Amino acid sequence: MTRIIKYVFYDILRTRFIIFYTAFLLVCTFAFFQLDGDFGKVVLSLMNVVLMAVPLVCVVFSTIHFFNSYEFIELMLAQPVNRRVIFLSEYIAVASSLCLAYVVGVGFPFIIYGAWQPVSTLLITGIFLTLVFVSLAFFSSVLTRDKAKAIGIALLFWFYFSLIYDGILLWVIYTFSDYPLEKLTVTLIAFNPVDLARIIMLLQLDIAALMGYTGAFYKDFFGSSLGIVFSISLLMLWVLWPVIFSMRIFSKKDL
Amino acid sequence: MRTGFVIAIIISCLSAKAAVIPVGLQERVTRIKDAVALAKPGDTLLIRPGVYREGNIILQKSLVILGESYPVLDGENQYEIFTIHADGVVIQGLKFINTGVASINDLAAIKLLESSRVRILQNKFDNTFFGIYLANSNHVWIEENQLQAEAEAEHQIGNGIHLWKCDHITIHNNRVEGHRDGIYFEFVTSSLITHNHSEGNMRYGLHFMFSHKNEYRNNTFKDNGAGVAVMYTREVTMVNNSFIHNWGPSAYGLLLKDIRDSFITGNSFAENSVGIFMEGSSRNKIQHNRFNQNGYALKLQASCDDNEIIQNNFQQNTFDLVTNGSLVLNKIEANYWDRYEGYDLNKDKTGDVPYRPISMYGTIVERMPQAILLWRSFLVLLLDRAEKAIPVLTPENLIDPLPAMRPYDFN
Amino acid sequence: MILIDKISKNFGSLSALNEVSLELKGGKSYALIGPNGSGKTTLIKSILGLVVPTSGNIQFEGKSIFNDWKYREKIGYMPQIGRYPENMRVGQLFEMMKHIRKDKIKTDEELMDAFKLYKIFDKRMHALSGGTRQKVSASLAFLFHAPVLILDEPTAGLDPVSVEILKEKIIREKRMGKLLIITSHILNDLDEIATEAVYLFEGRVQYDKSIAALKGETGESKLNRAIATLIRQRELLESVTDVEP
């Protein structure tokens, strides 16, 4: 398995896409540092990038990569190699190269500017979001044989979790605002990895946002060690379930 | 005020030979009550170290009561300790503990009734129901006292420094913790409140009503249950105070209700749920204040008019300004807003395009607090952008026409 | 060696394979023939486990291939279109394939040498022409001395010299007693290589006999003519009787 990972990983790193992605993140981060000397504000500006751009890049790149390596996968499958091993190798290679690009692109400027502390939350949630959306992209890739359709599904995942879901959530809050909604909203948040990541970051980076009674409830919940364990394990679930499901589909899939 | 006091001392020194009466177990007089009965006006009672359990001590003479190494006056959870009805009294260096708790009588460690020219200095108060209680008094100095209490509910505890119908009072350099209200004024006028520290009180760090023409300088109000509330008052001056981390469901850095003709300048509001909440207030000037990392920096209700909010710094607040109406009757000008994205082509350090400080999502959160959960999501970003382009929910002409490009340096 | 027992494969409503049964024996060379879309590639992919049949069973040396992958050690496969990680160098590709079968130390690099692939070892895959890719694919298929060789359109896109090199190699392998399964549109090529003909049409095995027998039956001396005659006969038969043969 390590051999296959190594080669796919090597291959991905050499494609221009990953280099562009790393450069894009580097430029963004450096630009934010140039515009604003305050580390806290840089981190908050980057938060938007992490929440929007990172998932988008992940779904598009992963889906395209999966379909571009279709023949390679076929070749591998004709070899005495377990299907799961091939699938996992592809996943690990794609996910880790995207993570690496992210860590370098965002982390490197922070090291240069000597601000390691605030960036750790940003890095961890960013890595989780990368993993989640690579999983979802792989899931959409094994659902169909059509590349365009798979990219469509993957983009739909992205669009849904970034925008539509929040719209629905806002509607729920608006409609039922007369009722105590705290527990319901916490439950609903659990069903969206982007929201989970956002809340974790809000708690670490933007405490002022969570003020007042409601805010205090969420802060008590998500800010407690139990809440952190809760949100991290939910994110893990969001990484794992698409991988497990798509591996199942993949091991029975026709190529 | 100070000159008046000095004159009073001189007069009392001249009029009689002031005697010093030591009180203590090893002394001829062992009880404070006996010493009070024995003393003539102008005498000094020197209280030796020890614990004195004498119930309620009523003082109706002009005496100086000096503690040596903080003798303890214990109210045994039953009594009020000092009830003073005399002018020219000095209470210094005593430690008061365990006054009684009563819901009908406001039992205090030191209660001052209809007195003037009294000084209460460098005392310690531990677990007192009310610490220092003044009614119908004037020209009183309350300085360098430390008041501390640990109550669990509001009804179990009184106020730290409580003033009712007083004038010309100086409250300086006291530290009040864990009471209901740290400092409470009702019908108090022409007083000066400086360098006090009010922290962790159950309700308000400072609370006053109908208390005109007072001046508050360099005080710190921190971590109080509901911050600072000032109501139904005019001509207040609040300068260089710090309102820090007053955090909670209905906590405010500063709650202004029916405040008129007042100055609020040079204050710092940091990490409060709401920096300033203004309701029914007019003709106030809010200038040169710093608003940092508050949930809402400023909540300006539509019932406010003719206020001037100028040259303040708004930095890293979740929402800078919210209001509940569409009328704009206040002047908001030349503030620094860290969210301002305009430009300054003519280099006059003022942005060339006006800034809209009202956040649309802030308005939504104001109505539905749970919506805060979506803060900083892409959806909210879009909504806020859309609203900035075409205002629908927020008043269209609420703008800062001359936003500053750089934060002001107030130091 | 390979026993295909009534396998069917449906892609949605389309039936790609319909109860195909075949016995492929070692030492023989099978030509898999049929028009486009007749199910040749699906059959090959089923043997390789790339396609999972809807029903039926495939045994490799007496063991079911489903949920097994080790049997593929004994198969060398040359796909119709060989696509590889675009940024990988040719040398790295070979190195990687060797690594994957790390227990196989001895490799057959005859074709690599014949095609002079070592000259392009530092070229990246995306820089290769279609023909060169075919050479790479062919060399990979023969690399591990696999007793079973499955070649999907092996000569397509190759220049005449390379076609001859490949053919000679295939014949040599056949003589070593290997099982060969070959599809090709160029029937003349198959004439020299194959001993058995399996004719697939619309997902069914229409014909499964030795090429010698086929030639005898149709009275043609060349395979391509024999097949053409066979197809014409079948079509005629079908249009008249509408009965399944």
Image (spheres, coloured by chain):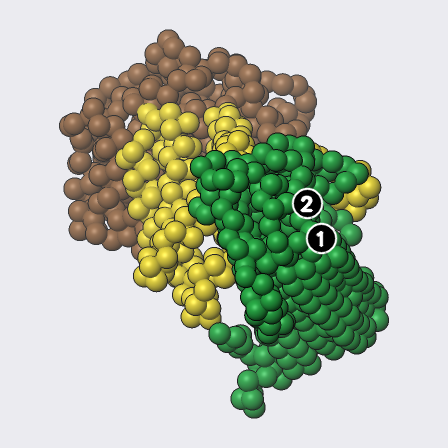
Chain colours: A yellow, B green, C brown
Residue depicted at x 60% and y 67%: B15
Residue depicted at x 51% and y 53%: B20
Please state, as top left, top right, bottom left or bottom right, where the N terminus of chain C lies in the image.
top left
The image position of residue C59, as x and y in percent, is 41, 13
**Labelled pair 1, 2 in contact (Cβ < 8 Å):** yes
Residue depicted at x 33% and y 59%: A114
Residue position marked by numbered label 1 in the rendering? B85
Quadrant hosting residue B209 = bottom right
User: Horizontal placement of B59 versus C152: left or right?
Assistant: right
User: Disc 2 is attached to a residue of which chain?
Assistant: B
Secondary element at image label 1: loop
Amino acid type, callout 2: Ile
The image position of residue C7, as x and y in percent, is 52, 17
The image position of residue C102, as x and y in percent, is 22, 28
Amino acid type, callout 1: His
Quadrant hosting residue A24 = bottom left
The label on residue B58 is 2
Please state, as top left, top right, bottom left or bottom right, where the C terminus of chain C lies in the image.
top right
User: Quick one: which residue is furthest to the top in this view?
Assistant: C62
Q: Residues within 10 Å of mark 1 (few under 14, many from 20)?
A: some
Quadrant hosting residue A95 = top left
Residue depicted at x 37% and y 9%: C62
Residue A233 visible within the image: yes
Closer to the N terminus: mark 1 or mark 2?
Answer: 2
User: Disc 1 is attached to a residue of which chain?
Assistant: B
- Above or below, A233 against B353 in this view is above
Residue C37 visible within the image: no
Secondary element at image label 2: strand
Front residue of B175/B272: it is B175
The image position of residue B301, as x and y in percent, is 79, 63
